[in-house]
Amino acid sequence: MIGKKITFLGLAICAAAVLCLAPNSMAKGSKSGNTQVIYTGSIAKKVMGYNGTTPVNITITGGKITKIEALSNKETPAYFNKAKSKVFKQFIGKTVDEGIRLNADVATGATYSSEALIKNIKMGLKQAKGSSSSKGGRRMSR
């Protein structure tokens, strides 16, 4: 009886791990129709804010940046929120090429976080541009 409980517990733990990891694996980059999501955590590993990395998901629909989502990081929330609100709105609505060329402003008092976000976004956009003309890459079908 104890063996069956341990086996069941082991299976439950494995199932929970798979469910927890599945959304993150999809975030690595995906494409569905004319929408693609670029995850910068793997391509911008060395881009540091004040307290560490600042990965984002960038959603591009019809060639335009429609959404930028900050992912888990160790930045101080007050400063990071200030950086996000200043930086993200400068990129939303731009084409991939416009975003790459954009000379974005940083948030006063949140320079490190702002600069890290800008670098993450630009690296993600370059990844999107490079893979939009080729098949495969880091994207996965949904």
Image: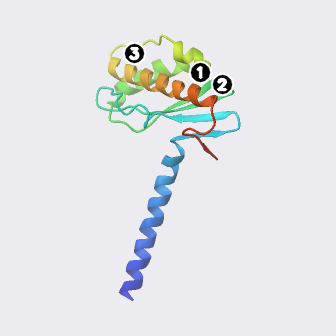
Mark 3 residue element: loop
Which corner quadrant of the image does residue 59 belong to?
A: top right
The kind of residue on which mark 1 rests is Val
Mark 3 = which residue? 107
The relative height of residue 67 versus residue 140 in the rendered view (above or below) is: above
The relative height of residue 136 versus residue 47 in the rendered view (above or below) is: below
The kind of residue on which mark 3 rests is Ala
Mark 2 = which residue? 63
- Are the residues tagged 1 and 2 within 8 Å (C-beta)? yes
Q: Which residue is drawn at 58% across and 25% down?
A: 129
The kind of residue on which mark 2 rests is Gly
Mark 1 or mark 2: name the one nearer the start of the chain.
2
Farthest residue, direction bottom = 1
Farthest residue, direction left = 51
Which corner quadrant of the image does residue 1 belong to?
A: bottom left
Q: Nearer the viewer, mark 3 or mark 2?
A: 2
Residue 21 locus on image (x, y percent):
47, 53
Compute the Cα span from label 3 to label 2: 27 Å
Closest to the observer, 24 or 127: 127
Closest to the observer, 90 or 34: 34
Q: Say which mark, if any, is on residue 21.
A: none
How busy is the neighbourhood of tag 1: few (under 14 within 10 Å), some, or many (20 plus)? many
Mark 1 = which residue? 96
Mark 1 or mark 3: name the one nearer the start of the chain.
1
Question: Position of 43 compared to 141: left or right?
Answer: left
